[in-house]
Image (cartoon, grey):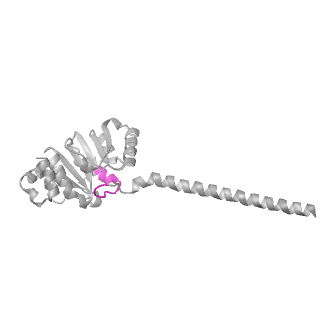
Amino acid sequence: MYQSKAFEFKLQVNSNAEKSRRSRLGLAVTGVVGGSLVALYAVAAPFVAPALRKICLPFVPATTAQVENVLRVLQARSGTLVDIGSGDGRIVIAAAKHGFQASGFELNPWLVWYSRYKAWREGVHRSTSFHISDLWKVSFAQYSNVVIFGVPQMMDQLELKLASELPSTAKVVACRFPFPTWVPERTDGEGIDTVWVYDAKTFKSHLQHGMTGRTTPDQQETLDSHT
């Protein structure tokens, strides 16, 4: 009788131990899977989520054709170049390889750090720089070549900003979407790979000859501060 009870007790203990082991194993697996998902999101999210800008400018990597088109329309140019909303840095790095002193401005810090790493890995870190900054809070007066992958909602405001800041010798290359009122001196590529080239002397002249009549009060205030 005592042996039977002892045997039953031993079976219950073993059963409880097995359940406990399975429970711990389940928690461990859940933790590993959950941790992996969190890590994956932490790595991937900065590259697919929009940066928090005044106007939402989502990160969409430039295609190989877009990069080639930008470099082709600027092949006779030199000096400083800035990519506004530089993303993963591919335009800046490609420009540096073609002799430009190239900079990128990007609000997403993960993309900026990744760009710096890529520039170092590809041997152009001395001729590139990447900055974590909102494009609306930066002056682009020091740049002679400007590249922008914008969205339609921001292009009219950016027209005024660039026209009031850039030197008359500058060239502006718009990718994916043209500027709404500027007249391009050249276009290259097709479809989403099209780029539009604008001469600063032309659009600054238009600004000085009464183009401010269509501006908003906030835009006019910005213009007045640069005159």
- Location of residue 24 with respect to 140 vertically, above or below: below
Quadrant of the frame with the N terminus: bottom right
The stretch of residues the image draws in magenta is: 53-68
Observer able to see residue 72: no
**Which residue occupies the foreground of this view, 75 or 86?**
86
* Quarter of image, res 213: bottom left
Q: Residue at x 65, y 59 (%)?
A: 26
State whether residue 111 appears in this view: yes
Q: In front: 38, or 48? A: 38
95 vs 18: above or below:
above
Q: For the view shown, which residue lies furthest in the right direction?
A: 1
Percent of width and height locating residue 85: 30, 50
Whole-percent x, y for residue 204 in the image: 11, 50
Q: Residue at x 22, y 49 (%)?
A: 73
Residue found at the far front of this picture: 2
Specify whether residue 66 is painted magenta.
yes
Q: Is residue 171 left or right of residue 50?
A: left
Dominant secondary structure of the magenta stretch? Answer: loop
**Residue at the far left in the pictured view:** 209
Q: Nearer the viewer, residue 134 or 128?
A: 134
How many callouts does the rendering have?
0
Residue, x 37% and y 37% (percent of image)? 123
Residue 208 spot, x, y in % from top left? 7, 51
Most extreme residue toward the top is 126
**x, y percent for residue 163:** 15, 50
In the picture shown, does residue 104 fall above or below 20? above
